[in-house]
């Protein structure tokens, strides 16, 4: 009977036991039954998944620890970023038209248009807790969703078509590295700024590998490199790493994840003050001041609650349909690859793009997706691969199978039927609920009222779960038992004894009779 893991027949039997010959007052009798049930029956809740077929790594996920030990996970993950110094310099010394022209020629103009934006650590942390590294999707109550190649192309205008960001990590001597920095960057780093093959550009505790400088040799050729797939690979890898229970920090392109959430999830999005003219990639509409009056900000508990109880109408599946024709051409330059099932490569990183799991984002009917095409062993191997100690490796050879698959991605474009009425097939949600983690937080975990925002997301989800059990139940006593279980688990058991503000059973019966007579007429 779903995530409420219970023997409802036992509960029903105890609730309906015969009273003594001397009948007490009905409310007193019910109260005694409930009190006796409390002492003799302990409630259980299964957070999910009910089947380990899809989320076979769920026991190693941060979400399970949040459920079991909420007090240890009250704080947000620290988001590290290395672009503050860049944007500070841009504010002090604006980029001239000549340099801006080079940047746009290389395919990075959309990043300039989008500008600097603070990162809400609480929002990113809440999304990490919903991220599943087996499927590279977020598991929300409405189904699976994710950041796709389409999102990267539309939001930042980064090129998708082209060669992968991958090559040989050749060793450089100190003098060779210094000469390369002087020739391509215009400065010679000091001894303490070079460490092997990496350069330390500022004090943000982020390192940039020198092998990226080779792409500055010919800026005009940069547009023929798939920077969009590299960004998505980096995003996926960092999200996967952050799902570890002991993860305390996170890096990577979290700016695009935040904008993606604002664009698609209504209940977490602020409102831009200014009017957007659609003359730049869509992320640029979030540049400038935002109105946060109706949106949660920097509160992890509130974001958890919102994501745990998000409804179908609160998620915008086809966000770009109404605006795609008004955006610059760079935002649709990779449309032929948007629905490709393919590897995403960024040097040593290989992550996988599974559009078949989020077909509603492309305006197509969602079917039960096929099994993940990777073995558990191969998935673990890919996630453990790092560039440390791999000097001299040619990653195009090490990842030759995946490089080949990338070049043939147009052969693996997922097709589907356009949504006309129902966005999912009949048995998709049943399948999904059986394979997802439904409860991130325990609706019974807070016996003492919390300070600040009260997280009712799990409680709302649990009541919805219970109503589904009741609706499918043919036995009145079992339905009553499920209702009692739901009210007790939500710590609202006393309300079952109070007058209801809904129509009484007699009124409902009378209304149904009147309706029947109307139809007969």
Image: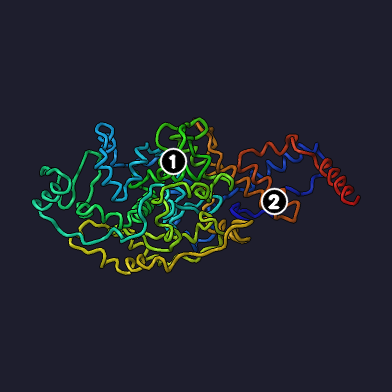
Query: For the N terminus, which image quadrant?
Result: bottom right
Residue 381: name its quadrant.
bottom left
| Left or right: residue 8 compared with residue 99 | right
- Extreme-left residue of the structure: 175
Sequence-first tag of 1 and 2: 1
Residue 366: name its quadrant.
bottom right
Residue 186, position as x, y percentages in the image: 15, 44
SS label for mark 1: helix
Residue toward you, 152 or 141 = 152
- Extreme-right residue of the structure: 521
Residue 373: name its quadrant.
bottom left
Q: How far apart are marks 1 and 2 (CA)?
A: 34 Å
Q: Residue 470: which numbered mark, if any?
A: 2
Residue 399, position as x, y percentages in the image: 29, 66
Colour basis: rainbow
Per the image, the residue denoted by label 1 is 123
Residue 108, position as x, y percentages in the image: 31, 47
> What is the tally of numbered marks visible in this picture?
2
Foreground: disc 1 or disc 2: 1
| Left or right: residue 197 compared with residue 11 | left
Residue 59 in view here: no
Residue toward you, 140 or 15 = 140
SS label for mark 2: helix
Residue at image x 74%, y 41%?
30
Residue 494 in view here: yes
Label 2 packing within 10 angstroms: few (<14), some (14-19), many (20+): some
Assess whether mark 2 and mark 1 are in contact (beta carbons under 8 angstroms). Answer: no
Residue at image x 75%, y 49%?
16
**Would you place residue 474 above or below residue 375 in this image?**
above
Residue at image x 53%, y 41%?
266
Label 1 packing within 10 angstroms: few (<14), some (14-19), many (20+): many
Q: Residue 167: which numbered mark, if any?
A: none
């Amino acid at each position: 009977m779903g995530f409420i893991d219970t023997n409802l027949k036992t509960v029903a039997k105890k609730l309906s036991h015969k009273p003594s010959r001397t009948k007490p007052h009905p409310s007193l009798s019910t109260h005694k039954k409930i009190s006796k049930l409390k002492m003799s029956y302990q409630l259980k809740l299964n957070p999910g998944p009910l089947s380990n077929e899809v989320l076979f790594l769920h026991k190693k996920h941060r979400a399970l620890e949040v459920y079991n030990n909420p007090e240890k996970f009250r704080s947000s993950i620290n988001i590290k970023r290395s672009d503050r110094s860049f944007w500070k310099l841009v504010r002090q010394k604006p980029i001239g038209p000549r340099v801006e022209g080079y940047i746009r020629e290389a395919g990075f103009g959309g990043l300039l248009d989008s500008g600097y934006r603070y990162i809400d650590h609480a929002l990113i942390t809440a999304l990490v807790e919903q991220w599943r590294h087996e499927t590279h999707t977020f598991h929300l109550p409405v189904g699976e969703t994710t950041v796709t190649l389409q999102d990267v192309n539309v939001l930042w205008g980064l090129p998708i078509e082209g060669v992968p960001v991958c090559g040989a990590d050749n060793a450089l001597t100190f003098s060779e590295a210094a000469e390369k920095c002087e020739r391509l960057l215009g400065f010679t780093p000091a001894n303490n700024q070079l460490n092997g093959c990496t350069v330390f550009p500022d004090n943000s505790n982020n390192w940039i590998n020198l092998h990226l400088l080779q792409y500055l040799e010919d800026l005009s050729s940069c547009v023929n490199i798939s920077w969009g797939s590299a960004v998505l690979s980096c995003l996926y890898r960092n999200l996967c790493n952050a799902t570890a229970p002991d993860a305390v920090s996170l890096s990577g392109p979290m700016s695009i994840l935040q904008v993606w959430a604002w664009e698609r999830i209504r209940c977490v999005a602020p409102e831009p003050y200014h009017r957007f003219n659609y003359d730049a990639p869509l992320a640029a509409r979030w540049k400038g001041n935002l109105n946060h009056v109706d949106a949660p900000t920097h509160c992890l508990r509130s974001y958890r609650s919102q994501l745990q109880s998000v409804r179908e109408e609160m998620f915008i599946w086809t966000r770009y349909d109404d605006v795609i024709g008004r955006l610059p051409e760079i935002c649709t330059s990779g449309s032929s690859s948007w629905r490709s099932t393919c590897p995403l490569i960024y040097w040593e990183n290989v992550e996988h793009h599974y559009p078949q799991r989020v077909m509603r984002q492309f305006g197509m009917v969602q079917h039960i997706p096929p099994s993940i095409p990777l073995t558990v062993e191969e998935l673990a191997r890919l996630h453990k691969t790092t560039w440390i100690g791999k000097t001299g490796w040619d990653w195009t050879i090490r990842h030759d199978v995946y490089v080949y698959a990338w070049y043939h991605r147009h052969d693996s474009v997922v097709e589907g039927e356009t949504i006309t009425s129902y966005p999912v097939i009949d048995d998709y949600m049943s399948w999904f609920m059986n394979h997802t983690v439904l409860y991130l937080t325990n609706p019974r975990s807070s016996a003492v009222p919390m300070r600040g925002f009260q997280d009712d997301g799990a409680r709302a989800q649990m009541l919805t779960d219970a109503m589904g059990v009741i609706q499918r139940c043919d036995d009145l006593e079992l339905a009553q038992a499920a209702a009692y279980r739901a009210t007790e688990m939500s710590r609202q058991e006393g309300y079952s004894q109070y007058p209801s503000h809904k129509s009484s059973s007699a009124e409902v019966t009378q209304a149904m009779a009147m309706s029947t007579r109307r139809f007969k007429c």
